[in-house]
Image (cartoon, helix red, strand yellow):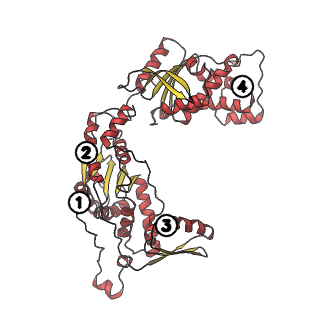
Amino acid sequence: MIAARVFLRLPRAASTFFSKEISRNISCSSQLLRTKVVAGTISVTSVDVRKSIVRGISTSADHGFIDRNPLEQYDYLVSEGQIRDDQFQRGIVASLVELHDEIRNYSPHNVEYPDLESLKPKKGLMAFLSPTQKHKLHTIDLSTVPKGIYLYGDVGCGKTMLMDMFYSTIPTTQLSKRRIHFHAFMQDVHKRNHQLKVQHGIDFDSIPFLAAALAEEARVFCFDEFQVIDVADAMILRRLFEILVHHGVVFVITSNRAPDELYKNGIQRQSFIPCIDLIKERLHVICLDSPTDYRRIERPLKDVYHSPLDAAAKVHAEKWFDYFANPRDPPHPATHTIWGRELHVPRASGKVAQFTFEQLCGQPLSAADYLELARVYQAFVVTDIPILTVSNKDRARRFITFLDAVYESKGKLVATSAVPFAHIFVDDRPNSKPQMNAAMMDMVGDLNVQSEQSLKNMNMFSGEEEVFAFARALSRLQQMSSAQWVDAVN
């Protein structure tokens, strides 16, 4: 094959950076011949340079690799309390296991790039003799390519979780893989397609070349939230999907719509029908009509914080503990070793731990202890939090350190307290006067701590750092009580 030369016009300041990037992208190629930067122009001569240029910046998510099949991974996630066991989902997992086994035994052919000249428009007599000439598909025996899976269903039925679980079990040593939201994928496709048109002309047939580059990047594509609502997307997908299939690419797709509902009532939809037919032919279509909506599991109570410490406080704590607990892991005491010391958790189940305030902050625990708890558990129920005054300021400091650890780990906090958190810190010294200067007041204001009583009570803390920590704690407590925070997946 004759080497191809590609010129990219770049600003002079960016030349060195992109030269390094291109060298890195194609450093694995033994056929790299020359890279040169002259007056803001990168000139790269290589058999494989066109592949590197067209790839651009990958937007794939690297979820790592877990050495289990999908069923083993599903059982593991259930045992860890990270997902709820669902018999309907287990039926879907069985199909994922079959595909997983086929992929492990799949040896795809090398990707063959089309000749650049064949994709350029014909001129003169050749254009007259073959005006409708179209790129010929690279043909392989599709019976040797595993059929993918198309999962569709309503929002919250677990499609994305199942696909991500499957993706994590695909060994990268076996096949290259890429997991991406479909909208981001199409943005990437349009960007690359535009770059090819700029380089080779508006009439350049870019889709076969782009498809080859994508197939070389990944032989397994996992698309989340597949939908087609734009005519430009529909027209590109019609050919792109067909060529990717003939390169031996395997697809796992999630969507809210069945294949026949894709691009419904869209412009020129009839031209998109062959793509729908190919999806139904090359992918097993599965409807996730699970009766459980995992985004709509009703929370036991509206608020995660309760005051005062009355009989309802115990009910509040118990309901939230049961909500976060793992039904297969009965509540029990737990012990963790940190730096040779034992840290006792009075009550735990799955990823939730429960303490009284005295158990959590009444003993000399350090930041390392709280960080370890936040690493191990995803939710905490802390009960019987008293009014915190100057006399128990050490406990207040520990509570703030604990809050910071839970917040940074995106953990959930349920609490029962003597008074609302806006009034939990109290400076009970007689004749205490505000001591904050204007700079400290501005710093606290940035954290949206506006309660007059809260500002007054900051005097129980000494120094700017402690005042800031106090203000930050109130701000974070407010944020952690929101429905968005509580319902978010860790």
Residue marked by disc 3: 27
Looking at marks 4 and 2 on the same chain, the residue that comes earlier in the sequence is marked by 2
Residue marked by disc 1: 144
**Contact check, label 1 and label 4, Cβ < 8 Å:** no
Q: Nearer the viewer, mark 4 or mark 2?
A: 2
Does the rendering let one see residue 477? no
- Residue farthest bottom in this picture: 125
Q: Which mark is residue 461?
A: 4
Looking at marks 1 and 3 on the same chain, the residue that comes earlier in the sequence is marked by 3
What kind of residue is marked 3?
Answer: Ser
Query: Can you give x and y, in whole percent of width and height, for residue 437 in the image?
Result: 78, 32
| Res 191 quadrant in image | bottom left
Q: CA distance from mark 1 to mark 3?
A: 31 Å
**Horizontal side of residue 91 vs 210, given as left or right:** left
Residue marked by disc 2: 95
- Residue farthest front in this picture: 340
Query: Can you give x and y, in whole percent of width and height, for residue 136 in the image?
Result: 28, 73
What kind of residue is marked 1?
Answer: Thr
Q: CA distance from mark 1 to mark 4?
A: 70 Å
Position above or below: 8 against 67: below
**Contact check, label 1 and label 2, Cβ < 8 Å:** no
| Res 145 quadrant in image | bottom left
Q: Nearer the viewer, mark 2 or mark 3?
A: 3
Position above or below: 476 against 176: above
Disc 3 residue crowd, few under 14, some 14–19, many 20+, Cα 10 Å: few
What is the secondary structure assignment of the residue under circle 1?
Answer: helix
- Residue farthest top in this picture: 311
Disc 1 residue crowd, few under 14, some 14–19, many 20+, Cα 10 Å: few
Looking at marks 4 and 3 on the same chain, the residue that comes earlier in the sequence is marked by 3
Looking at marks 2 and 3 on the same chain, the residue that comes earlier in the sequence is marked by 3
Q: CA distance from mark 2 to mark 3?
A: 39 Å
